[in-house]
Amino acid sequence: MLNNKLILAVVSLLLLQSAIVFAGFVAPYDPALQNRDLPFVPPTRIHFVDARGHWHLRPFIYQWVPLPQSVYEYQESGQREYPIYFLVRSNESTNAGVRTQFHLFGVEAPAQIFLAGSDNYGRDQFSRILFGGRISLGAGLLATGISLLLGLLLGAVSGFHGKWVDEPVMRLAELFLVLPWLYLLLAVRAFLPLHIGPAQTFFLLVAVIGTIGWARPARLIRGIVLSAKSRNYVLASRGFGASNGYILRRHILPHTYGVLLTQAALLIPQYVIAEVTLSFFGLGLSEPMPSWGNLLANLQQYSVLVSYWWMFAPALALILVSLGYFTVANAIQERLQSASA
Amino acid sequence: MRIEQAVKRAIKPALVRVSGLSKQYVQRGAFSRRKFVIHAVRDVDLEIQPQCLTALMGESGSGKSTLARCLAMLERPDKGEIWFEGAEISRGRGKELASLRPKIQMVFQDSAGTLNPRFSAAEIISEPLEIQRRCGGDKLRKRACELMEEVGLSPDWADRRPLEFSGGQRQRLAIARAIALQPAFLILDESLSKLDLITQAQILQLLSDLQTSHDLTYLLICHDLTLVKRVADFVMVMQNGEIVEQGTRQEVLNSPQHVHTRHLLSSVRDLESTFGDFQQGAGS
Amino acid sequence: MKYLERRMVHGALLLVSVSVLCFLFTDLAPGNFFDEMKLNPQISSDTVASLRSQYGLDRPLPVRYGRWVHSVMKGEWGYSFAYNSPVRGLILLRAPNTLLLTGCATLIAWLIAVPLGVWTASRAGGWPDRVCMSGTSFFIAVPEMVIVFGLLYFSIRTHALPAGGMFSRGFEQFGFAEKMIDLAKHLIIPVLTLVLASLPILVRHVRASMIEVLNAPFMAAARGHGISRSRVLFGYALPAGANPLISLFGLSLAGLLSGSLLVEVITGWPGLGPLLLEASVSRDLYVVIGVVMSSTVFMIMGNLLADALLVAVDPRMRTE
């Protein structure tokens, strides 16, 4: 059960998410920092051996220099080696409330290290991906929380109190489930104010994505509550004079933890993709705030898609998140099945 | 023992008195519009004497469990009244009844089902105390361990889950839980039915000891005549929701008035004689 | 029979509720098509006001809903502000394109998933099964967006396939065979994307269902009777495990009109997806409602069909 795949998944997720939380520290540059001289540079190559054949202990890079008489083509300038330093002092950033001037790695100015290349404004993609992760992953996590909370509340009330509450709630759930999810998301988002600030957009996205997805968790929770409610030990508890609140808390709710956990692991990647899709269509975060969605939107221009392969990098992060959470969800499900068997 | 009780009976009034109790269930077919009305309990009158063991016998579906649940305040009857220690308990609001609940407790048949598999033994036993807020924290656990000892379970097992206990031990757990609130009236709904004979005997011994030490009154619901013969002071027979016979053990078993009772008794006698021959045959 | 009738009534009620909800929502939404117009300084506010009343937007909600229902009954589904033409025409123009895409993809996906799922289930634990499980585990996690960009990348790089759209230039002049080939070439990337996105889940479900069935006692009996392996698999096991698959098939059908939005937008396929996107952004009210309702109809019909199939196929369903 605790197999290699699971460990790999958990570790990668933890690493990625920590990097995102501490994006200001891990990223060498501010995501809005432009360098109009170096648009669409490919990822910087890291060397250990220099042009003269000498081996360096500390890895280093060469500066990208635009080729004369051509657009967006570069070569490495072999003139000076710029070693990569760790724990570099640079611009200040705030990470999870901690202000620091340090960055995990960096090189001396005027060289820049573009681990994932740059975009048409010369902004470091690596930094943008990390900061974009705050938006995309953050939206996914928060929206999942909202869906699960709503689903838990409505499902528990529906399953526990039966008929008068159950019928309308389940009909409403059916309504939400019968509408095509992406269509619903699109329509709802589009019909809400479009031209609002980034913070408001973020919370609006979270609210929309989270609220639309309450139905499936609610149904699952309702099923669990219904079956738990009819158990004999609940009847026995009533015989001792237990109140509804006590029964819910002590006997019924513990049954829901498994489902909640599995749903969380399944919904997080879905909701991250939802945010990415919305931002991709221009209905979410827009320039200059980075989100994996609007980063990937660059690929819609075929010239970018074909010539600048490093612009695919946000997709890698997306795949990692999806794979990671999906593996975790599988493991949880297996664990639950073997526990109840 | 019996003489003392008979004397007590003459002096004390009935602990529980039921008059005109009725309860019915309505069941709807899954997809049809037809309704089935099940008259589980019809116009039942009975009395339960204190500090005695009353046995309630009847076939499956005769309404014994429904009657028991009404007595235990787990269901509300449609008609009729139940008097417990002079107070009417079938009508009335939750708050008024709350003070009476601890006095009437029930031990169910299916011990595994009535014990939450995720709770530990100590948590199960102390649950009534917790709900009724009799004590808290460490005292809860202490009390649970005391009760475990009283029913013959080792307190070292306080943290085990119910499924780690055997069937007989689970019934002991259920009994410990039932006496936690120090009830006066204990209803045992087929609690001995799923146990093997040796375990049955042990539990019966426990129940007998508890009756003396806690001044308990028992209502034992079962369909095992040999069991009834051994332990009951009073016997009631139910058929189709009605009580067709009630009286002392002598009266009912030796001179049954109702056809159904006679039918019940005779079928068991047939079995006994058959097996009696069989045993004799095997012995010789 | 009663069961199906009830499901149909249920579906109809659902449709009505959805339409009411749509109207309610679009009414609550701040801003409308003409607000955007107001931002244009060249159009006077009087013109905007008169346009609004012309389209009946200044009437109260129940009146608007009533008029919409009335016109739907007559076969008109409202009017698009942006395209200045009836919604019905727009939808009928685009829907077949979407259906062509999703229809092909669904067909191909199921044609691959069922045999593959049955085969890997029959050899559960063997290397084809393990490869299949790893493959599906991976592909389930890859988002559709990534798949489509990946495919586009390779096709553009190799100049193998047209890079999107539905028709090449000069399509009208092609002969019939050429038209078919051209269409097929344009279909490959979007269809492949949809197939790759849905195949892993389908295969897993078929496989899971089959494994459950294959472990049942009656299977051992069938094999003991000497029936050939493939006949056992497809003649006995598959029908027995068909129930969840039929429901799944119903779900596939239900999503025919709505599952391809992303792919259509990215590859420029002229289906309902891009239409909805544009309409949503520009607040083209009746287009949005028309598209959402159309796909909801498909959803409900898909579920109904699944229910009907279940009743027809599984004798246990008929005896309630």
Image: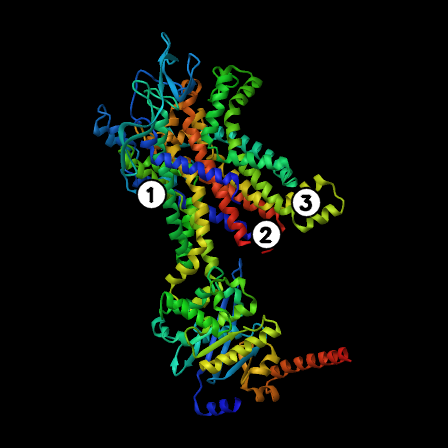
Give the amino acid type for the residue marked by disc 1 in the picture.
Leu
**Distance of label 2 from label 3 (alpha carbons):** 18 Å
Q: Chain of mark 2?
A: C
In this view, the residue in front, A273 or B238, is A273
**Is residue A206 depicted above or below B160 in this figure?**
above
Above or below for A180 versus B83: above
Q: Residues within 10 Å of mark 3 (few under 14, many from 20)?
A: some
Front position in the image: A50 or A183: A50
Q: Residues within 10 Å of mark 1 (few under 14, many from 20)?
A: some
Circle 2: residue type: Met
Q: Earlier in the sequence, mark 2 or mark 1?
A: 1
Q: Which residue is mark 3?
A: C236
Q: Earlier in the sequence, mark 2 or mark 3?
A: 3
Marked residue chain, label 3: C
**Chain to which mark 1 belongs:** C
Q: What element does badge 1 sit on?
A: helix
Of circles 1 and 3, which is in front?
3
- Residue at 66% x, 80% y is B268
